[in-house]
Image (cartoon, rainbow, N blue to C red):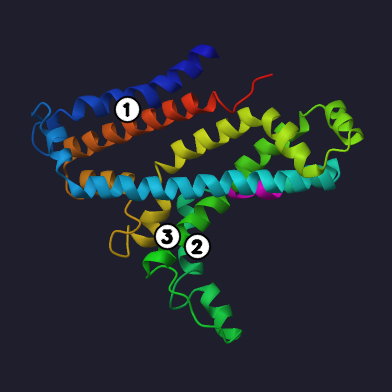
Amino acid sequence: MVASALAVVVVFTVAPIIASFVLALFKWDAISSPQYVGLDNFDALLSDKTVTHSLLVTSGLALIIVFLQVALGLGLALLVAQRTSKIVQKLFRSAFFLPLLASAASISIVMAYVFNDQFGVINYYLNLLHLPEVSWLSSTGGATATIVLVAVWQQLGFTFILFVAALGSVPGDVLEAAQIDGASPARMFWRIKLPLISPTVLFASTVGLINTMQLFDQPYVMTKGGPGDSTYTTVLLVYQTAFQNLQFGYASAISVVLFAVLLIITAVQFTVSRKWVFYS
């Protein structure tokens, strides 16, 4: 069992990473033979404003999406854990988990029709209510907000389930003692619950950042990186560079840079977390 799991990790994770590092040293169009160019691809990255812009767009989207996922997931978990029975909690878990069962691409296709400017469901009901239509996908602000909304909605169930489980592990006797001492619900949250579930907050934010820094399906399906390049993420740039421009070596170099950025972000997160994460 362990050997099988290790083989899967090597084949689908380690091997592609190594292949990307190697291919980044070559110029290859998938037709002619690969040509070794050393670090030329990385030199070209330094002056490529498109790469810099895509990293900034991706980072901005990732920060907003992860913040909303963690904040909303924790808020909903607090409401469900405090005010509902175990059966209702299970129903909420199932309901929030359902979007995770569908692929991001299929959800993005549906949402592209829902938010379509001309014949979308949202604008249809806005018309019925005699409200002005919204340029969901054809304006910079609307496209960004729509991408964020869809990404948060699909991944919210993951953070919700994590926080429900974490809050369920908080010792009841500690909370009862705090209530006897007259602690308010807000004080109990900030002083007791949040410190005890801080490892879960770190895990949810770290996994969320890693996933959203690789955001691809929603921008590709819903906006194609537009309008302009307002939702042009790094993975979308990698895809277009490799499969449309046939610059596989350069696309691999961009992937290596994104991999390095993810490593740095994760390292910074764990370094900073030493001050606010408490392991019991």
First in sequence, mark 1 or 3: give its number.
1
Verify whether residue 98 appears in magenta. Answer: yes
Residue 202 screen position, x and y as percent? 56, 31
Residue in the picture at 54% in, 51% down: 152
| Quadrant in which the N terminus is drawn | top right
Residue 196 screen position, x and y as percent? 70, 28
Which residue is outermost to the bottom? 130
Residue in the picture at 33% in, 44% down: 235
Q: Amino acid at mark 2?
A: Met
Residue 199 screen position, x and y as percent? 61, 27
Residue in the picture at 45% in, 69% down: 136
First in sequence, mark 2 or 1: give its number.
1
Residue 165 is at least partly visible in this image: no
In the rendered view, would you say 200 is above or below 147? above
Q: Nearer the viewer, mark 2 or mark 3?
A: 3
Identify the residue position indicated by label 1 in the image.
16
Identify the residue position indicated by label 3 in the image.
144
**Region rendered in magenta:** 95-100
Q: Does 234 sit left or right of 72 as displayed?
A: left
In the rendered view, would you say 250 is above or below 154? above
Q: What mark, if any, has residue 111 been given in the picture?
A: 2
